[in-house]
Image: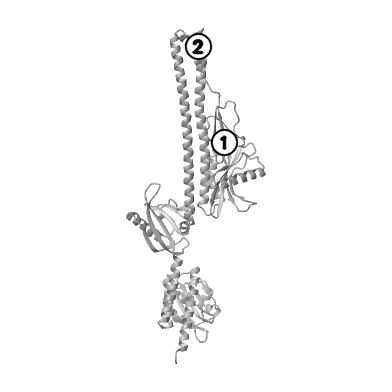
Amino acid sequence: MTGLAASVLAGFGARAWERRDAESDFRMQASGDVDGLRGVLERTIEHMHSVIGLYESSEEVLPTEFASFVGRALERYPAIRSFGWVDVRPSEVERFAVGIIEGQSDEVDATDTELDTVRTEVLDRSLEQRALALSRPLTGPGQQVLAALPFLRAGSGGLVTVRLDVPRLVEAASAQTRLFVTDGGSGTPLAGTADDAALFQRNILVGDRSWTVVCSPRVPLRTATWRPWAVFVAGALVSLLLAQSVVVTTSRARITKLVAEQEVELEQTNRSVEEGLEERVRIEEERRRLELQLRQVIDLVPHMIFAVDDEGRMLLVNKAAAVAFGSTVQGLTGKVELDAAGPREWRDRSRAAERDVVERSRPQLIPVDTFVDADGKSHLLHTVRIPYRASVDGRPAVLCVAVDITERVQAEGVNSAYKRALSCLARGEGLDRVLTSLLESAEELVPGMVGSVLLLDETGIHLRHAAAPSLPAEYNAAVDGLAVGPGVGSCGAAAYEGRRVIVEDIDIHPNWASYRELAHSANLRACWSHPIFSSAGSVLGTLALYYREPRSPDAFELELIGELARLAGVAIDRYRAVEELSPG
């Protein structure tokens, strides 16, 4: 009787042992499924950061570019029902303005009022916390939530939003068990249904909300029915040998204790792994935040900043450099400098300078370097190149900072012309020498330009040659004695009308119809003329700037011709005043 009872007890013990084994295996699967769900959420957050990067590196993102950028994520992850960009406005009435929404808009039974309320709540929380925020569940069978991630910088801001279909999110996690997900704050079901057979539960943090994940078996846990019977038979046999039964019982107790200890160790290991993953996520988010701060800082600098490795590949480009090269930050990053946009001659010089900096491993300063931007405008740059080691692979690299000093050099040139003219006057040199000095200074300041001064004679009707150091003598002789009048070239019209006359293309301007062949003989294609006024306001003559190709003046050239005409007027007034005071 005692042996039979022991056999029965042993059979039930074997069955309970199999049950514990099955439950232990199930918990391991459930833990892996919860980790898989967390991984899908982390990839969704990475896509939101990618959208922020798109807006961060572009002046303006069009709806078509936005659709193309998020299209692959929408196709690859069905759980992401839509991507959106929301602008932040200073108005308290309409603080948020939906910029772009891309993706599916179905399966949302929430009313417009509820959807707007939920969206406003989550956007406010996200901006307040400056971090990812998650909404409460939306009404309807779709079991969907809204997530928002802020992006803030000086002068503008916005948020990236996604609408998550939680059941599809669970499906994307490739769960081996049945998952029942509820909102930790409200207890509202988000995915799956409750099951009395649940054997595993864990809370996961999603933004500023907690989700409770309950796992239950997809099919009932199976136990081998033959084992209890085998134990019963074995127990009946072992009951004949009491000593052996005691040994078996003791061994079973030891094994049970060992398994329990191993389960405790496994649970501790799982907790350590989870804590390690959370720390990695925190470190990665901090790295991204610092990268965004660096990008904002260098893009605020108005000077050209870029870095290249020892093979000439662009590692870093700010917006000022991208605009100068006629491209974008995204379009230049990763490209070889010699293949990038911009003037080839300057790129060749820049590449040679970078090789020299790498080889010598010391900074290089170029006080003045000529650069022509993508619009064809010439600039003078003060350039510094500094060697360093790239943080990714440790390869030699060069940081280049180029400051545009064009305006400063131009201002110094105008000041130098003014001083040279005053020096000529102080030495008592003739008026023709003073005017020639003034024009020579201007021609040095603007390469390719030639200047001319014509003065009205005593009748006030004809213009006489006064100075033109770079024009052919034949041309100067032909315009000497030119009668003023409307439509008479550039100088005749400027002297007659008392205003500046800009002719951008001599070949097509009606004022030059009678003088076009003369201009061709001197290889002249553009002429800008400014009247020279006396201190009393009367017209003394004209100062003209000629170019050998059609062109219109920029702001500096307009200022330059006006300043030259003013200086010429001062010189002429002083020269004539001295003549009047001279005896005889």
Type of the residue with mark 1:
Trp
Instruction: Look at mark 2 in the image and give the residue it sits on.
Output: 6
Q: Residue at x 46, y 15 (%)?
A: 249
Q: What secondary structure is marked by label 2? A: helix
Report the amino acid beneath label 2.
Answer: Ala
Q: Residue at x 43, y 52 (%)?
A: 316
Q: How packed is label 1: few (under 14 Cα within 10 Å), some, or many (20 or more)? A: many
Residue 566 coordinates in the image, percent (x, y) = 49, 77
Q: Position of residue 403 (x, y in %)?
A: 43, 61
| Residue plotted at (51% across, 43% down) | 46
Residue 551 appears in view: no
Q: Is residue 416 above or below residue 345?
A: below
* 3D distance between C-alphas at marks 2 and 1: 47 Å
Q: Is residue 213 left or right of residue 377?
A: right
Q: Could you classify mark 2 by the number of other residues whose Cα lies within 10 Å: few (under 14), some (14-19), or many (20 or more)?
A: some
Residue at image mark 1 = 211
- Determine which quarter of the picture holds residue 142: top right
Foreground residue among 556 and 105:
556
Query: If the image is split into quadrants, where does the C terminus sit?
Result: bottom left
Instruction: Please provide percent x and percent y for residue 374.
Output: 46, 60
Q: Position of residue 245 (x, y in %)?
A: 45, 12
The residue tagged with tag 1: helix, strand or loop? Answer: strand
Q: In this rendering, does residue 423 appear at all?
A: yes
Looking at the rendered structure, which numbered label has been put on residue 438? none
Rendered position, 170 above or below 534: above
81 vs 91, nearest the viewer = 91
Q: Residue at x 46, y 67 (%)?
A: 407
Q: Residue extending furthest bottom?
A: 584
| Image: 340 above or below 278 | below
Marked residue nearer the N-terminal end (2 or 1): 2
